[in-house]
Amino acid sequence: YFFLSHLATVDIAYACNTVPQMLVNLLRPAQPISFAGCMMQTFLFLTFAVTECLLLVVMSYDRYVAICLPLRYPTIMSWSICVTLAVTSWTLGVLISLVHMVLLLPLPFCGPQKVNHFFCEILAVLKLACADTHLNEVMVLTGSVSVLVGPLSAIVVSYGHILRAILKMQSAEGRWKAFSTCSSHLCVVGLFYGTAIIMYVGPQHGDPQEQKKYLLLFHSLFNPLIYSFRN
């Protein structure tokens, strides 16, 4: 539950960063978000998204050790190791977001000032810049690959070992307990990584951008509910 508490905190903050302003925009379209507010929303969105991505990898490793190496679990996943992994996830989330903000803030925004999204998502904000944003787009793609494809591969490997260990269990009750432990985590992994890869790793031109916008909205609203109901 230590990592669950961090994931719950990220999901609550993730929703609180986007949903209130989105409701204000829907109820009062004439009341725009300020430039500083938009930049802060972009920064927090990136921070929480990257942190959640890394926490999901840590949780998959935690489940791998618990199911495949149960007798060594207290030694491998000691309190100090758990704290270190959680702090590292938050720190990397902040640092990676700062890199994107350092590249985003100097850009001039002199054209239309309507963000074609439900909140200040970084790709939607970049479309409003009056300068060349190729470097920004390359950094978004590079960052997305590094925090999505790599971690997802690690999760797949972890669950491959977990599945093999579960199938070797003789007790039906033991298999059910193991599947129950992993089910909600797998749901969040599928929803989170699936949405993020479609949004940031797939082709950015020629795709139905409006569908991507609604997909990200669906993820932002329903992803926090999965673990809330599970807990």
Image (cartoon, rainbow, N blue to C red):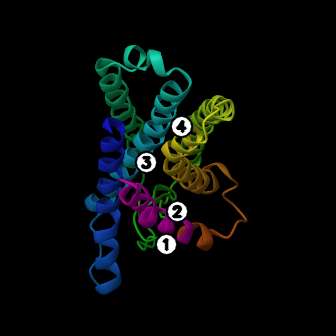
Chain-order first, disc 4 or disc 3: 3
Residue 147: which disc? 4
Q: Secondary structure at mark 1?
A: loop
Q: Which residue is mark 2?
A: 127
User: Which residue is located at x 52 percent, y 62 percent?
Assistant: 127
Stretch in magenta: 214-231
**Image location (x, y in percent) of residue 144:** 56, 42
Tags 2 and 1 touching, CB below 8 Å:
yes
- Report the quarter where the N terminus lies: top left
Spatial CA distance of label 2 from label 1 is: 9 Å
Chain-order first, disc 1 or disc 3: 3
Mark 3 surroundings within 10 Å by alpha-carbon count, few (fewer than 14), some (14 through 19), many (20 or more): many
Spatial CA distance of label 4 from label 2 is: 23 Å
Q: Nearer the viewer, residue 170 or 39?
A: 170
Confirm whether residue 39 shows in the render: no
Q: Secondary structure at mark 2?
A: loop
User: Which residue is located at x 48 percent, y 64 percent?
Assistant: 128
At label 3, which amino acid type do we have? Answer: Ala
